[in-house]
Amino acid sequence: MLINSNNITINKLKSKLLDDKGVSISMLRLDEIHPVVSGNKLFKLHYFLQEAMQHPGQPIITFGGAYSNHLSATAFAAKLLHIPGLGYVRGEKPPQLSHTLQQCMADNMQLHYLPRDIYRQMAEGGLTHKEGIIIPEGGYHPTGAKGAALIMDLLAEENATHICTAVGTATTLAGLLLGAAAHQKIIAIPVLKGMDDIEQRLEFLTGHHQYDNLEILRNYHFGGYAKKNRALIKFMNDFYEQHAVPTDFVYTAKMMYAVIDSIQNDHFIPGSHIVCVHTGGLQGNRSLPAGTLIF
Ligand SMILES: *Cc1c(COP(=O)(O)O)cnc(C)c1O
């Protein structure tokens, strides 16, 4: 990794439920890499950044909306490696910049705002490699999946029977599938409603669409991307109280809710050792009204 991953810990959770059901959960704390930058994003960027380092002077160019964790991770990584960063932002420049965009600017990323239709054209191949190292929106590319596969290196000594991740573009999921042993089950929790193209995405990202060790838990999107309800917020607070692990309402809370609910429903056989990848995203909680969360 070009990014220091020495401070990442693996936390074993303790609870009566886990004891009663005879299963264990550990959380891989990629959120500990950086308070703002989602850990999985840096892994997805790894090989793009490596390529950029081999072409000094060339900017890295990427795409995202005003709340894109990917855009902010790219800005952060580019600054760290002294590579010029250029970000195309979907939509007009808002009068009040989001925290994400403010952070991109603080990390010296040059931002260009594009009307949505032009953004679409650009993001879907409107640039040539002459202009720089192009990283697709969300890192959604086989190169991004290859980088995400490095996450599995951190779990070499963990003996996980199941590895869980929240799914947005499915690039992180693809990486886990690439890096997992055949006997390890990968559990995907889509955070978008009706995400029925995961297999096609995996085909693009890895060259395979059929994985016998993949399981998708489809019923934990809570109404769709960044949607939430009181049960989810209560879960986040209870989970923090019990385990002292903060989660974000867009990705990791939905994953943990799915895992705990599945354990309650005897979905995992006794003896299972479940590793949940905490992908970060905690800065997203800043959009919640003050006092919503206890952390
Ligand atoms: C982007 C993101 C994800 C989803 O990753 P994909 O590779 O796009 O599926 C999960 N968790 C967090 C915190 C993220 O920022």
Image (cartoon, rainbow, N blue to C red):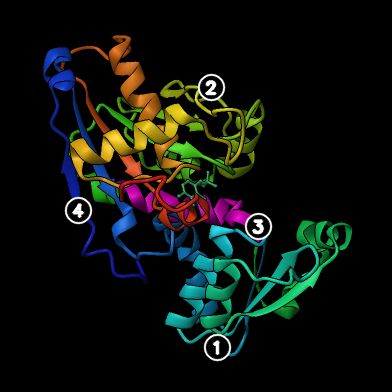
Q: Secondary structure at mark 1?
A: loop
Residue at (33, 55) in percent of width and height: 31
Disc 3 residue crowd, few under 14, some 14–19, many 20+, Cα 10 Å: some
Q: Which residue is under mark 1?
A: 56
> Depth-wise, is mark 2 or mark 1 nearer the camera?
2
Q: Amino acid at mark 3?
A: Glu
Q: Which residue is under mark 3?
A: 137
The answer to whether residue 184 is seen in the rendering is yes
Q: Residue furthest front?
A: 291
Image: 190 above or below 83: above
The answer to whether residue 188 is seen in the rendering is no
Q: Amino acid at mark 1?
A: Pro
Q: CA distance from mark 3 to mark 2?
A: 23 Å
Quadrant housing residue 257: top left
Q: Amino acid at mark 2?
A: Arg
* The residue at label 3 has a CB less than 8 Å from ligand 1: no
Which is nearer the eye, 152 or 226?
Answer: 226
Q: Which residues are magenta?
A: 136-152
